Image: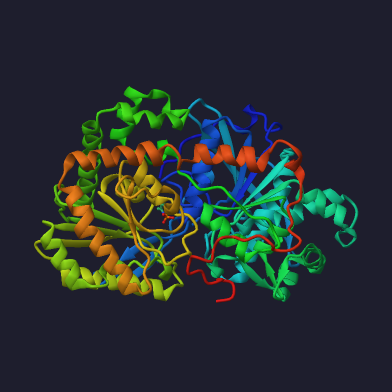
Amino acid sequence: MSIPKTSPLADFDLSNRTIAYFSMEIALSPQIPTYSGGLGMLAGDTLRSAADTSAPMIAISLVYRRGYFRQQLNDVGQQTEADVPWSPEDLPSAGPTVTLVLQDRQVQLRAWRYDVTGTTGHIVPVFLLDSDIEGNDPWDRKLTDHLYGGDTYYRLCQEAILGLGGIALLQALRVRPEVYHMNEGHASLLTLGLLEEHLGSRPLSEATDADREAIRRQCVFTTHTPVPAGHDQFGVDQMNQVLGPNRGAAIEAAGGLHNGLLNMTYLALCLSRYVNGVAMQHGKVSQYMFPEYKVHSITNGVHAATWMSPAFQELFDSEIPDWRTDNRYFRSIYGIDPARISACHVKSKQRLFAWLARRTGHYFNPSVLTLGFARRVATYKRAGLLLQDPERLCSLAEKIGGLQILYAGKAHPADNAAKALIRDVFAAAVKLNSEFLKIYYIENYDWELGALLTQGVDVWVNTPRRPYEASGTSGMKAALNGVPSLSILDGWWIEGHAENTTGWAIENGETEETEANNLYNKLEKVIAPFWANPNAWARLQQHCIGINGTFFNTQRMLGQYFSNAYFPSGPSRFQQERLADSEEEFGLSETAFVPVNKA
Ligand SMILES: *Cc1c(COP(=O)(O)O)cnc(C)c1O
């Protein structure tokens, strides 16, 4: 595995880094397995846009020497997992070693530096903490091996490494940021590290409201999911065991316990001056879940140069070359002949099908309408909705002259319900594949496959159960490649959807059957006729980029973080935004929203 060489540490100055970005996972390169899915992709895309715009950022994560996992699927779709070992030794080590006390053990940590380099050469350094050091307890040496592996004890140790170890590393590097951004609650323990640093020689037990306020002024928190299981919780005994009773008491005093458990989301909420959800509706849902805290919204994006197909990059490099430093130039796609846009997509579709034929021996027809559905397999994402009524699907495929459906996605190794969903798609494919309908589940959804699929299919499908999709970003990748979405109105699609212009909504229904029926109707009566009209389809592709590519990118998103969260101007800059009562109306009543924390 070859990893790009980076420059030695000595040749740049970190003292001007004002924003520290902490994330449990960051997708840095297709060759480095330090991510599992959307959260890590978002973190990586954020840093890539930060590098492009010369943002004074620095980032902290863990090294994961054995990665998340490579997915293997046998011929009935049974998933097995394999480690993805890689060697950070190819990266420069960051030098200083820091010590963290976990339970009663001293754990030495070092960090490997990966440089994210922007279009103009600006570097955002990412420090990947590593506990695999000689002298550490053999068990501790494996603490930075697996992303989302192990039990809650392992996980809490990892979160301590990220939050407390990360703050210690910044101190050792003599970096003193003004803003600490917690990308999801996994990073919440950094607040405790900051509090310890702030107190100096005073013990944690003496921390006052004023001390905590000093921490709050520096912290920004982004929450990422309305699914309860997505919010980390740990037993109080385990908290005291791993972190020690003093830190446990400090967490309790700060408000980090909820329903008698250490709740990483509440810890972050209590000690942040700015909190946001990742799409407009997700902000509202989160506000409903956490009524005592003000929750804003900053809608996610994707890094354009990472996700746009080579064909489109070539077109834009010749027509609007400044898109690389300023994504707003995508708006001028309206000056480009739609036929040229279609031609780029044809190339991406052929590229995807050639890759598939090489990899799997399966041949797909480039002239047939092709749907893509790829995401982390979780029950609320409802991979099976498209297959709900097999007879209807078959007859519809025949009526519209053929249909191809490509699936991909990993189930978490411990999620047996999700694994069963993959087998269901396999079984459906065996039963339904015919002259007119071809369904295929592609193994090992990862960065490379995610790019090929979002660039190469004709319609990107998303069928979450509302309101559980916080944002979703794969549809944004598709839009950037002129690929319209067919999706439930949830997450980002509420903002990105313009019917018959950027794609189509699957109308809400009372039952799964109704929603599946709405999906089939849309496919048969609206999308197929569109597909039969290449000029209309080309205009659609143009709108996807002109309307949605222009907005749903991490460059716009990061700009909003800068102006609204990191460095807002005016009196609100360091204001603590804690609401006394929840008097606000959040406009959720018209949705079928069930408060998920009580469900
Ligand atoms: C973009 C991406 C995701 C996140 O997309 P969602 O729309 O949130 O599902 C997950 N995994 C991979 C490999 C991706 O490229």
Quadrant of residue 285 within the rendered picture = bottom right
Where does the image place residue 385, in percent across and percent down from the top left?
A: 31, 68
Q: Residue at x 73, y 48 (%)?
A: 168
Q: Nearer the viewer, residue 514 or 278?
A: 514
Residue at point 44%, 67% (across, down):
412
Q: How many marks?
A: 0
Work out which quarter of the rendered image holds the N terminus and state it. top left
Q: Nearer the viewer, residue 91 or 576?
A: 576
252, 173: nearer the viewer:
252
Percent from the top left, x then y, of residue 192?
Answer: 76, 56
Which quarter of the image is occupied by the C terminus? bottom right
| Color theme of the render | rainbow
The answer to whether one can see residue 135 in this image is no
Q: Is residue 418 left or right of residue 189?
A: left
Residue 432 can be seen in this image: yes
Q: Is residue 436 above or below residue 512?
A: above
Along the horizontal axis of the image, is 166 left or right of 124? right
State the residue at coordinates (55%, 65%). 230
Q: Is residue 183 left or right of residue 449?
A: right
In the image, residue 123 sits, relative to residue 220, either above or below, namely: above
Q: Position of residue 77 (x, y in %)?
A: 29, 70
Residue 202 in percent (x, y) is at: 90, 54
Quick one: 308 or 447, which is closer to the camera?
308
Q: Residue at x 13, y 57 (%)?
A: 400
